Amino acid sequence: MRKNRMLLILSILVMAAMVLGACATPTEAPTEAPAPEPTKAPEPTEVPPPPPALGSEEYPIQVLFVPSVDIDFMIAGGVLIEQALNEATGMFFEVSIPTSYAATIEAMCASPDDTIGFIPAMGYALASQLCGVEPGLASERYGWNVYWTEFLVARDSDFQTLEDLEGATWAYPDAGSTSGYLYPLAIFADMGITIGDKVEAGGHPQAVKAVYNGEADVGTAYFSAPRLPEGNWTVDMAPDIPDELVEECGLNEDGKLFCGGYRVMDARSAIREEAPDVVQKVRILALSSEIPNDTMSYSPNFPMDLREIINAAITEYVASDACAETLCNENFYDWTATGPIFDENFDGIRILMEAQGITLENIGE
């Protein structure tokens, strides 16, 4: 009985082993690893073209002029200046006249790599403070590297001294003008003169015209020395035409404003064509102290090598006959030569601006 039971158990174990063996997963024979697929060469990528060079036709140099005189004449002259500079340097230029002195400064700082600005002394001081604009050249006019503010009043007015201007209506060209605004503002403050209404005329000719038309008691604008029949004007001489010659003032056959042998070069000559009797109607009451002449300045990152080329080209252009149709014309900026200029030359301007609390943000307030 026990033997039969043992046989039964053994039979069951054998059968179980056979069943388990049949259910086991057969081991696959090892196979070779698949060969790697060949690596494809990367697709060539397009290299972007280099940016156009400054001064190329695709990337012209920006040239800005403050709108201080006859805008239409400046626009027409700007085209000729573009052409002349292109011929002299092989580079391309784009001239524009912003709407104000402040707009010119802001445009220079907004384009720090590629802009030239023809700006006056206060404009330069503001621009250098705002974004590091640097001077390139200064203008000269008939041997002078300075100019002055002239205070203009009606010839038949009772004003005899600056103190008489208490409460007067004042027409000035633009709040960014050195001669038209900064210097007279400082003089009025220094002398304790309280001006009445102020009129921003829009340019030097317009400030003269405001006095001529009786719209302002006093106008301030640039003064350039008159051309005398003999010799040269000096600062110890009267700024205006001798009284006995006033009635002789008028345009000559070349359209220049003469009084006898005196040629009028100050801001009154800017309206000579529409008002040839301007000297008979408007006189010079007083002058300011000397002011550094206006500049040709560069935006802060303008390439140094191009500055040298352009300085030389402008200097040569101003010395040429062609300049008489544009920059050297009295309807434009009346440059007759160029000279060196340095940042420290404007320290006096900065002192005046600080004393008057003038910044680009509050200019004209």
Image (cartoon, rainbow, N blue to C red):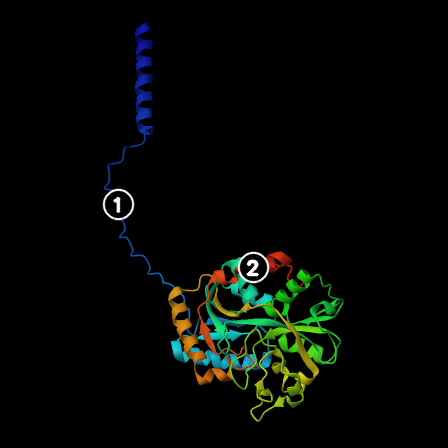
The residue lying furthest to the top in this view is 2
Q: Position of residue 36 (x, y in %)?
A: 26, 48
| Element type where label 1 sits in the image | loop
Q: Is residue 204 left or right of residue 314?
A: right
Q: Position of residue 349 (x, y in %)?
A: 56, 62
The residue that label 1 is drawn on is: 34
Picture residue at 55% right of the left edge, 72% below the top: 147
- When asked about the image quadrant of residue 331, the answer is bottom right
| Element type where label 2 sits in the image | helix
Q: Position of residue 34 (x, y in %)?
A: 26, 45
Question: Can residue 255 be seen in this snapshot?
Answer: yes
Q: Quadrant of the N terminus?
A: top left
Q: Nearer the viewer, residue 32 or 187?
A: 187
The residue that label 2 is drawn on is: 350
Q: Nearer the viewer, residue 346 or 11?
A: 346
Question: Between disc 2 and disc 1, whose residue precedes?
Answer: 1
The residue lying furthest to the front in this view is 236
Q: Nearer the viewer, residue 176 or 288?
A: 288
Residue type beneath disc 2: Arg
